[in-house]
Image (tube, coloured by chain):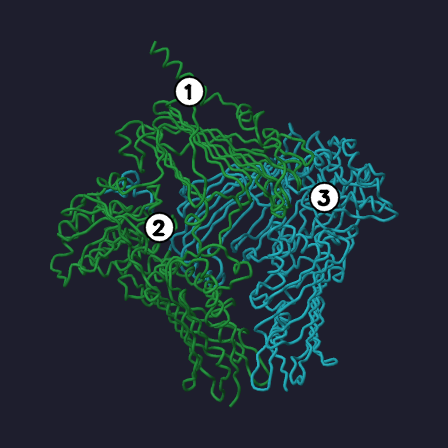
Chain colours: A cyan, B green
Amino acid sequence: MKNLILSLCACVSFSTLAQKNIDPTAEDISKAKSLREQYSKDDVAILESTDAVNFDYNSSADKITVSIKTNEHLMNINHRADIHKYEFYDSESSIENFKVKFRNEKDASFYVKDEPYKDDDLFYNDARVKYTSIDFPVQGYTYFYELNKKYNDIKYCTTFYFQDEFPVLKKKIVFTVPKWLDIELKEFNFAGFDIKKNITDTDGSTIYTFTLENAPAYFKEKDSPGRTYLYPHIMILTKSYAKGSKAGTLFKTHEDLYKWYASLVKLMQNEPEKLREKVTELTAKAKTDEEKIKNIYYWVQDNIRYIAFEDGIAGFKPDEAQNVFEKRYGDCKGMANLIKQMLVLAGFDARLTWIGTKHIAYDYKTPSLAVDNHMICTLFYKGKRYFLDGTEKFCAFGEYAERIQNKEVMIEDGEKCILDKVPLGAAAANKEVFTANLSLEQEQLKGTCQRSFLGESREYFQNIYNHFESNKKKEMLDGYLAHQNKSIKVDQVKMSDINNREQKLTIDYSIDIANKVSSFDNEIYVDLDFMNEYKEFQLKDRKTDYEFDYKTLYESVITLKLPAGYKVTKLPESIAVKENNYEVNLTYAVENNVIVYKKSFLFKNAVLKASDFEQWRAVNKRVAESYNTQIILTK
Amino acid sequence: MKIKLLWAALLCNVFFVLGQSASEVRDEIWSASDPYKKANTVPEKWKNESAVIIYKHENYDYHKFGINVTYTSSIRKRILLLDQASVKEFSEFSYRDKFYSNKALGSFWRRGTNFIGVKIVKPDGKEVIIDTDKEAKEVDGEKKLAIPNLEIGDIIDYYFYSVEPFKSVYDYTFEAVETPLGDVYPTMNLKINLHTENDFFLNFNTYNGTPPLNQIDTGKSSDRLFELKAENIEKNEFPRWFYPLAEMPCYKFQVIFARSGKFEKLADGFLPESEKVVKKTISKEDIFEYYNKKFYPDGDLGVVNRYLKEKSFATEEEKVREIYYFCRHEFFTRYFEAFVVNEAKIMYPFAYYGTNPIFFRDEVPFVNYFMQFLKKQEISYDVIIATPRFNGSIDDLLIQQNVRKLIRVNTPKPIYIEYFNAYSGTDQVNYSIENSKAYVLEVSKGKRVTDVSNVTLPSSTYKDNVSRIKTKVDLVDFTGYKVQRDAAYFGHLKESEQDDKLQFYDFVYEDYNRYGTMKLMDYVRKEKDRKQYTNELDALIKKLKDKQNETYKSNVESEYEVKVDDYTFEIKNTGRYGKDNALEIHDGFTIANNYVKKAGDKYLLEIGRFLTSQIEIDKKEIERKNNIYMSFPRSFENEITFNIPEGYSVSGLEKLNKKVENETGGFVSTAEVKGNQLVIKTLKYYKNYFEPNANWNKMIQFLDAAYQFTQEKVLLKKN
């Protein structure tokens, strides 16, 4: 008989766990209970958190360094909490102290792990994470957390936030700015928050203290705007320094930022000759310049795999065009550079272009590395600028993805740069249409359907469809068209060219729907809405704006031929709603013995604002009621 | 002379372990004589596949020098990529160059080496060998390789070659390999090699139409090379209710290293009589040989005897059952609190149980302890050796680890008792071995195994394995529902629900009360500590209960396929003591804006939905080619009572009355109005463990009937 437990007994001392003065006091427990009432979804509250930010000058490297000392007091407000405390760093930063202490200030000695940061979207990156697991055994239990982090170069230290993944009762950020350093502490999203700002002067420094009380935790909702839109924060804009005999300009304007980016671009050693054969092949038979451009742009979309690298300076310097071409993979910068080099070889004016995607709220008025996160290529053609994004798949020339529309771009222009904006698109360009022409056979709805997709709805469909293995595509498509519903059978599916990005994508098929028609006595009840679009889109309890993948226009037209001898005695009520961010229309009519049921949903700005939600829920309820209302046919 | 030879051998061995370079490995696998070097085409029938494996070669090599064992394994695949999905699949690799073997203990750990090679063959036949060292990025020892210039229509030809040295002083049993012949893509050519030398014992067999393993003459008596070759293998597909190893072409093998006869006896497997022989089947004699000394009465019965004192039992069966449940607590669930407390870092609890607490870790101590108990009680018993049905028949047994050991108590109605889980009982044997052929190790005089015979283990019926759910449904505002359910589960359906639904606190305190044993906190003498730990455990339980509620709610939402609100639940009975003792759970919730359709001043109620979602057999499944393998026969009884609102009546009950029954099972439903209630009763049942494919259509008939029931509606109208 094995004795599993005995072997474990000898080596562990009891005393380490029976620490004194670490259990919560009666006041702590009472405080935790009242905080839990206030923050009912959170396990932990940060009672107090201070970031003390100091700047220094490293003369040997000619770099301004930043050190941040964070002190936090954490309290468990739920019955029990088990959390991770973590901090990221990379080749430009380091963590010099990471410690958790008990209430009695004794080191809790939790094991701190140091691992590479793994992200499914990044093939390789230099980010690492230090983290530890913290258990709070009872309500009111507290810990102190200390962190010292250092940036070797101020340009990589960009923003400071007041909030955390847990609610913060009091957050203080203190910047001690030496007089030799010219920085601006730019405030974002302060409106609506009672952030107190205090400025004091000492001999050599100016001290800026920002304080926010009772800040809720970060929202944990999907499809939200980026955090640069949602939360109050401070961006450090480092303009210049003059320390003794040393002086320099950092990012005073966007042109300074451009200069730094351009200096990295100059490090590239492109060998365009290695692309010539392919460029010739792509352009030789083209009848027009536009065809040449498209052939190059589409070839890159189709043949270069997106693999993301974030690796120190390589995170900012594009890979050489011939490398990307030969490897057939690259990140956004490598793809933009390849498109540029190929177009230039073909005789066009193409330039590298920096851009912050929709996820980022900033533009180049705030020159900082936080402004952009993406690179595309701008083509100057017949007096117009076209923006080419190699990371898109199935994106037609002249069409732009929602994530870059209306965003400011910084285009290379020799020693200077050009600021411009990607054009804003319209929802109509992404229109998706469903049509069904049905008749009644026994208690089945039978007929033909068509689905069509334009713009980003087309791209979205093409991306998903092409993701499936060849031998599974038919099954997946049939399942999609049948709404994964056993009562709906589709057949005779015909799709237009799935790889064509310049045409409307259409899918025609026949349909046979069971269980949507019920006959009682002399009446037939027809549930004509078998799609129930947006019925579950209730946004219940949601706090942040809902962002759509793209500006959405969905239209549906379903017709039903009346069976002989029947007339319509009841139709659901029509709905017509027109608001700033959305329009919903449901109409029913009988025309020449045919019921015509039209639906349209328009989300023209690709967003439902939090302020829209209350009204949207009321509209959604009406839509659900309409879906739940039967058409009645009577003999 | 002898010394010289020894040195020569030692040097050879060192060279073999340390000297193998990446280029040597590459030249060995992609040799100049590689017969697949120019194999670039695939059959027309597979042109619509995502990819086709042109050649797959697995190699397993076992060598030793004294206690130094070198296990070398490699896999090479040459694959034609036919779509974007397969290009993506092979566009990135992650691996480690170096690793530590886990095949030995403590200071015997040795460093292993992995070699990877990748080449691309373009459609024009041009070969490009990837410089993996140059292309790969490394973080903390893990390498990530993005394959350059990989396109649809290319062939990727890669290998992964692992050299794993370790030391084994006694014996070492390598992990068994049991796998279907196929891969995720169709395979044109497959070759598997095993290379062994003396002291390595090989069990290998092929099944269900797989070609046999052949021996290839190496010219050396201490050295053996085996080969399995197969061609034209369709890709693996695993449909619903399927045991791949029972039906698909497959192979199984296991290698055991044992340096001497003494260690051979200790080895954890059915060894062939000699290293020179490949063992293909396990005979009755092998079973006897391996197990006759493995089991013997053992264990301190003091605690059991104390429990038995002043207790009387009407029958031996009753006594055995009672002792089983007692031991399930005493040697198992009694420690659950401690494991939880330890895991939650509340304290280190194990020392409280004295210097020699008994916790049954696996089947062997369990069997030995009960042998001791039954021997002392002079109750006849035998040991049963069985294998789960998903491994195939016990006649095809090859791997010792696939065996389940249990005891048959030879009372007038035999009782089968098995190693515990928190919910196991004495009324049914584990469903995986039920109704299967097994061996009986016959025990003489309660002491020794003296013979082996065959037996078919008992089976259960759909009347034993029952889910019985009563659902009360009220209409709310004519737009939604209030639902109250009382569920009772029996037999094997009970076990799976218990495992899914119960948390430790739902049953350990029940056991403490039943047996008067001390809770963990009662052992803590210092009052201050006890108070602290109790508070912390209570806090943990409260947190777990909150999570349990969320999990239940989300399970209900999956069952009903809609969001629910106001969810509450209560476990009325844990059902852990015997066949007739059901797991009983009550829950309640509301459903808004679903399953009610307005039709003028009438309402269509989707009452069939309250059966909850049913299996939907789609077009692809209808065309199933395989036989049907299920865990156990089972039945699902439902009673749905709908309270008809005052002043209203329901019509259209005809469609709720269904009856499809055949030799595979059935679905039967009835609906009637009783007073102000619509009462619907349904029964869905599966009669058998196994159905031949010819019966699949019959199963579909009742499965479709159950699905169709969920779609049925009744009309609610004013009187």
Measured as percent of width and height from the top left, residue B296 is found at 19, 43
The residue lying toward the viewer, choosing from A225 and A138, is: A225
A292 or A97, nearer to the observer? A292
Q: Residue furthest left?
A: B310
Q: Position of residue A483 (x, y in %)?
A: 60, 64
Residues tagged by mark 2 and mark 3 found on one chain of the structure: no
Q: Alpha-carbon neighbours of circle 1 within 10 Å: few (<14), some, or many (≥20)?
A: some
Secondary structure at badge 3 equals strand
What chain does mark 1 sit on?
A: B
Q: Which mark is residue B13?
A: 1
| Residue at image point 52% right, 61% down | B622
In the figure, B532 relative to B146: above or below? below
Check disc 3 and report the residue beneath it.
Answer: A375
Subunit bearing disc 2: B
Give the image location of residue B548, x and y in percent: 41, 60
The x, y position of residue B430, in whole percent, is: 32, 55
Q: Which residue is mark 2?
A: B388
- Marks 3 & 1 on one chain: no
Q: Answer few, some or many: residues within 10 Å of disc 2's Cα (few below 14, many 20 plus, some between 14 and 19).
A: many
Quick one: SS at disc 2? loop
**Residue B356, quarter of the rendered image:** top left
Residue at the bottom extreme of this rendering: B719
The kind of residue tagged 2 is Pro
| As drawn, B35 above or below B392 | above
Q: In the rendering, which numbered label is found on residue A25?
A: none
Distance from the alpha carbon under mark 1 to that under mark 2: 42 Å
Q: Is residue A21 visible?
A: no
